[in-house]
Image (cartoon, rainbow, N blue to C red):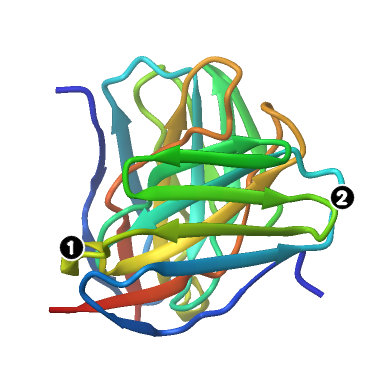
Amino acid sequence: QKEVEQDPGPLSVPEGAIVSLNCTYSNSAFQYFMWYRQYSRKGPELLMYTYSSGNKEDGRFTAQVDKSSKYISLFIRDSQPSDSATYLCAMSRGSSYKLIFGSGTRLLVRP
Amino acid sequence: EADIYQTPRYLVIGTGKKITLECSQTMGHDKMYWYQQDPGMELHLIHYSYGVNSTEKGDLSSESTVSRIRTEHFPLTLESARPSHTSQYLCASSEGSGDYEQYFGPGTRLTVT
């Protein structure tokens, strides 16, 4: 069983929709939760990170962590065609521990 | 401009050849990483380095080797390429104590025929 599970998609939404991307995990020791965005033929780029539980907002993006359910989410408001990419969740047990990545969800925002 | 570079971007090579994938960063980061990524699959850490002359193997067994002679340079070498090495190789770096904030290069897509 993988430590981090992520639906591969693709998830197709119309422009302006609210997008919800999710990951589940099995290791209760994870403390840091990250969302990376990867465009085709590019390397991943860090969008947001959250320490422990709670919400974090950055512009149109909101990251949510529910440690009791071992579930994390990324919400994108007013989605744009430029948001079309693969979104990878990643987790680690501490600030100096290796990252464990999900396999990514491919998002397509239709104009 | 501070960045992380990988060359070549694409490489097609025959079985048995020796190859070196280059990775350089201009951000002065102490920590650097190599990941392997297959289509639709998660990134797997194959090597990492926390500074000059420090290298460690990652979670995924790999026949590649790495070196870290200069802070900015972290090349990966395959002594004898095989078709099973066909994959995308991503280099990343991070600063200070925060492994969670990693900056990735554009990747090298390797095909071994």
- The residue labelled by disc 1 is A82
Residue A47 point in image, percent of width and height = 40, 44
Q: Tell me which corner region of the image, top left, top right, bottom left or bottom right, holds residue A107.
A: bottom left
Task: Name the residue: 66% across, 48% down.
Answer: A91
Secondary structure under badge 2? loop
- For the residues labelled 2 and 1, the Cα–Cα distance comes to 34 Å
Residue flagged by tag 2: what amino acid is it? Answer: Ser
Pick the quarter of the image with the C terminus of chain B. bottom left
Image side of residue B3 versus residue A6, left or right? left
Image side of residue A37 versus residue B31, left or right? left
Pick the quarter of the image with the N terminus of chain B. top left
Task: Name the residue: 46% across, 83% down.
Answer: A9
Determine whether B83 is above or below B25 in the image.
below
Front-most of residues A39 and A78: A78
Whether residue B6 can be seen here: yes
Q: Residues within 10 Å of mark 1 (few under 14, many from 20)?
A: few
Image side of residue A81 versus residue A46, left or right? left
Residue flagged by tag 1: what amino acid is it? Answer: Ser
Q: Are marks 2 and 1 on the same chain?
A: yes
On residue A28, which mark appears?
Answer: 2
Whether residue B86 can be seen here: no
